[in-house]
Image: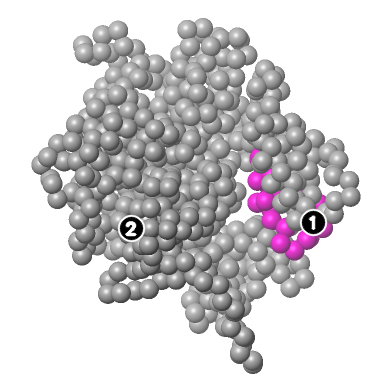
Amino acid sequence: MEMRLDGPQIAVFMDFENVATSAEATLGDFDVNAVMALLRSRGRLLIKRAYADWGRFPRYRRALLESGVDLFQLYSFGMQQKNRADVRLAIDAMEVVFTRPNIDVYAILSGDSDFTELIHKLRDHGKYTIGIGLHSATSDLLRRACDEFIFYETLVSEELTDIADELQLPDPRELLHGALLAAAQKGETPIFAGRLKQIMLGLDSAFSEANYGFSQFRAFLEAYQDLITIQEQGLQLYINLRQPEAPPPTPPNVAKPIADPGQRYRSFLREAGLRVVEPSVRRQVLADFLATVGDHREPLSLNAVADLLRDRYDTENALTPKVAVPEMMRLLVMSDALTFAGGQATGDAPLLNTGELALERLSEACEMAYVWRLVEGGVPIYPEQLAPVLFGPDADAGPVTALCRKLIGEDRIIPAGDAFTIAPAQVNRLLQRTELATAISNLNRVGLPPGEPISLLTAEELFREASELRQKDFTGSAQRYLQAARIQLELLRTGQARAGFDDFKWYLASYCSAKAGHAFVSNSYADAVPYYLGFFGLAQEADGVWPRIQRLVNPMCSYFFAIAGKQLGEGVPPNLGRSLPAQVALQIHNHKNPEVGRTWEQLMERLADVNLGMIRQIWREVRGFMSPANPQGTQSPGDAGDSSGMRAEHTRTFLAELIAQREAANG
């Protein structure tokens, strides 16, 4: 591969339907920005193309266009059209090979084995190939064909060590050590870093520094300086195995540097999906938010406001507030300051009573959301340390102390020693929710492991054991999840420091999902329904546990929808865990047996009672299946015999009416 001072020149081709559908089915969403950031770190992106029926993926178009990706439209006429994207992408990639010889690297985003021959052909022409796809949806043939393959899960996971183990990636330390030994046997050490990476990829094509959380190979190498030595000569790095040496003595009377006491707050909030926005930017975006909703007579949703604000900041070339928009929308949905149609806080729900909003109250509510999220996560609050994080480096403890007092006054938190913990009223409110009645009844009766202490460590260990058992023993897994939840509940009730309320909800949601899965595979479909509803009741977008639960939502929806057919002994779509819920909904609701569709409608009514946001999501996705040229879903001359549009309209209409009913009842 020719080296340039500005890095290799790259062409990116995305089989977007393949990667986005797989990501949504397993992780809840597809993060365009994470993928593009990785690719930009590899060199100059000269060609960026994505192929899909964009009527089905409207929410990704903005992020792709902002990243300079060209969107190639492939219209869908029915549900089985995957090969059309494969053929078009392959033709375009080979055309670039012959017309743009300056392109060094081809990045193919897909897990489809059909692209294996394309990869072979690109390599035949001397091109370096990078594959990106989901581990659960990637052909092993495709992975091994690429010079380098990056698993998408590693780009978005917060716990890279855990995800590396889960995906069975090669041990990076062993791979690095083995490659250096192989180089030493050939007399090539110290070895040029680029050549070292080639050897590592030859040993296992699943290696990529990105799979372990590093944006550059150099950063990866620097993390293993206890194993290797790095010599820099000019612009090149040369690597060798480090020879064992005695550690130097610790100098006497040398104080260790004091870590930033506010860093733990920033780190926790970032991992919880709440990056701290600078106070002045926070206030600017909120002021613009109020101006935007005030300029529109029709109610807007948070998602619609976010789009309008990004358009405005684009026009004004105001990058800083534009980047902050997603964080501010997340804060607002968690803030308790807004009124949502239907009574449940989601980004898709129209906002009500916006004329009553004031900037000061909105700002305070967002600041309280930060504090609440920390207490909910079991992080001790020390106002003098948190104040500089939320209000700037010169802030004193006063503003944070005032926020804590308000949360105490709302019976959301209580003092616990020199910190705070969740108020009992919050825990009791959760335990009394109707959709959780079955799970809470079991929680109150479960026995704890004999001889084990009631501690955070015990709860975490039980949860770990449950997660390991989940794929092979639903019953044993569910039992341990429930025991972990019971221990966490006892710790919350006794005001245990660092006992997280969101951990309790996460343990309980995991129990509900395991019990629902066990009942489903045991054909006990009526027994499964309360556990599915319990899970969906906990999977609220406005809740702090949402980032953990989100990746389970789509597969849980698909299996829940399939109950309508299973209960009646009728066939259901295959591969439920990997199918978009909206696709399953269309097939179940429009089943050849009308009773299946009616049963599905009854399940949707129960789901709407506990999580109207899920109904909105399915409605939005079903609407996306409808052809932009034929939005009413009626047949056109070119669609003779194809009733997919009418089926989508049938389901869309039912969901729209259901949403309208709930909004009217809770307006």
Identity, as a three-letter code, of the amino acid under mark 2: Arg
Q: Secondary structure at mark 2?
A: helix
Residue at figure coordinates x 28%, y 31% from the top left = 117
Is residue 307 magenta-colored?
no
Can residue 247 be seen by looking at this rendering?
A: yes
Residue nearest the observer in this picture, 656 or 236: 236
Q: Which residues are magenta?
A: 489-511
Q: Residue furthest left?
A: 99
Q: Secondary structure at mark 1?
A: loop
Q: Which mark is residue 455?
A: 1
Residue 331 % position (x, y): 50, 56
Is residue 501 magenta-colored?
yes
Residue at figure coordinates x 16%, y 41% from the top left = 97
- Tell me how far mark 1 sits from mark 2, CA to CA: 49 Å
Residue linked to disc 2: 195
Occupied quadrant, residue 524: top right
Residue 245 % position (x, y): 56, 76
Residue nearest the observer in this picture, 253 or 186: 186
How was the colour assigned to the protein in this rendering? one colour
